[in-house]
Image: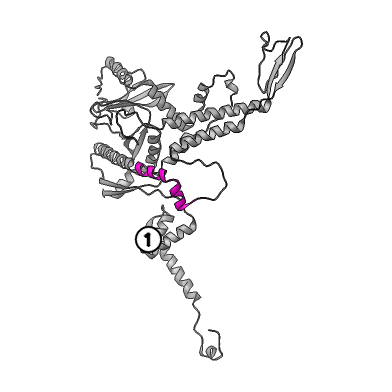
Amino acid sequence: MILINTAEDTIKKNIEQFRAQQDDRMMARLEKQIDFFEGDHIPYIAELIKRKDKEGMPYSYINLTKHIVSKLSMVYHNPPERIITGNADKYNELIRNKNVRLKTCEQQARLMPFILVRPWLRTNGNDQYFNYQIIRYFYIFEDVKDIEYPAAVMYPIQTNDNKRIWEYWDRENHFVFSNDGKRLKNQEDYGINPDMLNEYGELPHALLRFDDVIEDIWRGGAFDLVDSNLMIDLALTELNYEFRWQSFKQVYATAGGATDLRDTEVEFGYNKVVKVVGENAQIGILDLQPNFLASIEVIKFQMNTIAMNYNITMKWELSGNAESGFALVVKNIDLLNSWKNDIEHCRRWERDIFAKEKLVYEHDTGKALPAKDMHVDFAEVKFPINPDEERRRWDWEFSHNISTPLDYMKAQSPDTPEDELKKRLEENAKLTGTIKAAEKPKPLTFEERLLGANV
């Protein structure tokens, strides 16, 4: 572990040592992962194109990275049920933002080799609740005794005029410093004690990842997905480039029998006018006929290949009958198994984040966390079924006393309070009883029966 000396002359050396532990190529790789997920593809496409006319290049890209990562991240699609030992109501109020943030965490942990999550208490007057800082770009110093959890971390928290402010943590130290390694004088402005000590006694960050550490903590993540996405973006850009020139044709010019026009500067482009002066000067058009269908098939093949690697089926047609129920389960059985495996990782995340919540709450408030223990029941991943299948399922569950009408209403309106649903059921029962009473035929009078009224 790096022991940071607060003396100014040693901080620079310590930070340089810290950065030297992590390959610059890995940091560039992390930035690339983030850029592709956020949709910033063009700089990476431009870097691969060697043509001089880059300014007129019709850059095209598809955010396949975000699409596939989002589709794979289904564990927190439906919020899990947290079974609390202790004051459940107060704890649930403290973690009101947890499900939303963990849904984002699931996506980012799939994109990156791993991410860090730091629970911290936000206080607004008398209102207090946890917020969850998600950190995906950072340097770490590995612990030789524990390769799964770093001994120290640092990450940028602010960027002004291309100058980053970094936050540093290890078990003993906590401070912010500038990009050149100088610690800032106004530590209190960043919520840090002037002694620059880590008052928690350990890192308040939980480490979230989907791949277990074997030898290298940086293994994992969707690096192959981003690399494939870049190749598909390049192919799409080249396809549009060819289409532009095929649409407006390629102009050529000759002057004085020379085809290279060494003594004449000519600016080519579909929106440029060509002027050629010289003996026997002439201009013509080359009609390019690129095979667009073949290029499109290559792009589709690349997309199908990377999707298949992630157990996802690409859908190219908008027509056809919609699949549901058991057919979808069979078609996505590999994806379903993958989701079940992910649940075990997410169960570990919940346990680790809960431990950090306890650490932060007890230190910051001087009180015990309202939840003494927690068990998480993750929601099952379900595929859509057609109305007939759903009706038969509920009828079967009602007839076997597995579910009640209240369960059905909860499934249809999960955000409605249970008391409101019970009230609706009582009102519906009263209304149904009134209707049935109104529909019941009146008893026939003695005279009507004598006259042979139709019973």
Q: Residue furthest top?
A: 263
> Is residue 418 on the magenta stretch?
no
Q: Residues within 10 Å of mark 1 (few under 14, many from 20)?
A: some
Magenta stretch bounds: 322-342
Q: What x and y, as percent, mark residue 446? A: 51, 90
Query: Residue at label 1?
Result: 403
Where in the figure is residue 307, as x and y percent of width and height? 47, 37
Inspect the image, locate mark 1, and give the three-letter code of the amino acid beneath it.
Answer: Ser
- Give the answer, above or below, for where 83 lies relative to 14: below
Residue found 54% across the figure and 19% down from its top: 50
Image height of 43 relative to 318, above or below: above
In the foreground, 220 or 56:
220
**Quadrant of the rendered image containing residue 274:** top right
Q: From what the image shows, is residue 9 above or below residue 108?
A: above
Q: Position of residue 451 (x, y in %)?
A: 56, 90
**Looking at the image, which is closer to me, 308 or 419?**
308
Which residue is at a point 38% across and 24% down the rendered structure image? Answer: 26
Residue located farthest toward the right when viewing the structure as drawn? 280
